[in-house]
Image (cartoon, rainbow, N blue to C red):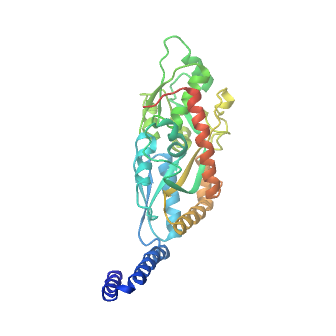
Amino acid sequence: MKWLANARLGFAARRHPYCAAAVAIAASMMAVATPSTAHATYPDRPIRLVVPYTAGGGGDALARMVAARMSTFLKQPIVVENVPGAGGTIGANKVARAAPDGYTMLLGVSGTHVIAPSTFPRLPYDPLRDFIPVSRIAYGGNVLVANPAFSAHSLPELIALARKPGADIAYGSWGEGSGGHLAVTSINVAAKIQLRHVPYKGASPVLADVMGGILPIGMSDTTTALSLIKAGKLRPLAVSGAERSPALPDIPTFAECGIPLKLDIWFGLFAPANTPEPIVDLLEKAAHEAAADPSLKARVAEFGLHATQISRAAFAEQMRIETRTWADLVKATGVKFN
């Protein structure tokens, strides 16, 4: 037992002062050996995966699918915990402050890691310093949707409607400073209109209010909106991102409609900084095994996303580049955040 070994070392040091240095070295070696033992037995209990958005959304669905497949590989349950609010930064901060032992992970998104540094003046964490990127899971564009009774059937028609005297068109997104907020801000700037922002805690409540007629339009990740679009409960107007969504091939991109926005959003797994590398390696391997599952790849495609895997180093470099790109976009739009 560790406490008994420490007691014997202390007793030996008191009886033989000249052995104090040797005792210190032995104690140091024991301290170094302990983490290695922990790595060898990891994981030996359930792992928590924090999703920084409400349950029922696209990110939540994706997280649960990935967690189920990673659990099979790791032979331990991965329990999803939803911690919504502040554009995902509340949940992200919770993981940034968690013990770096491999038992807490985050489903991070571009909003929490490459957009937030430019939109939250008092961001409580540093995305590059406080996290280790484990694996990028999926990427794609967001979608601008409307209530089926809304008079605009396309983004150009929406812009024309917003230019009419006295127009006051509100839209919802999953939070101030989110990718959805910035996407519509880009429309405002490029088209010289003023669509009014109403922030929510997640995409699901945005879509509920659009379907209910409380809002005429809203931004959502494609994953959350797709089933409602296919059911005719929402009308897609345009998608952001560099290319059309594979699940909505007939819907044009913002760029095709004259709005110069080609930034994709992505979902990725993150661990707190200082998580031991052997643990991160194992989590990365589990994530790649999950992403290679044909049924998961098919589901990701059905959500309108892509699941191409890249290395941790490539993912980290992508984050650094996109952080600068989003910062330039925020500066260009002139939007101010509280």
- Image quadrant assignment for residue 190: top right
Residue 87 in view (yes/no): yes
Task: Please identify the quarter of the rendering in which residue 17 is found.
Answer: bottom left
Give the quadrant of residue 12: bottom left
The correct choice, above or below, for 11 with respect to 68 in the image is below
Whether residue 201 sits left or right of residue 282 in the image: it is left
Q: Nearer the viewer, residue 56 or 75?
A: 75
The answer to whether any part of residue 236 appears in the image is no
Q: Observer-nearest residue: 120 or 163?
A: 120
Q: Position of residue 247 (x, y in %)?
A: 63, 43
In the depicted structure, whether residue 120 falls above or below residue 298: above
| Left or right: 211 in relation to 291 | left
Where residue 116 sits: x, y (%)? 50, 40
The residue positioned 52% from the left and 37% from the top of the image is 118
Pinpoint residue 20: horizontal percent, then vertical percent: 38, 82
Q: Nearer the viewer, residue 215 or 231?
A: 215
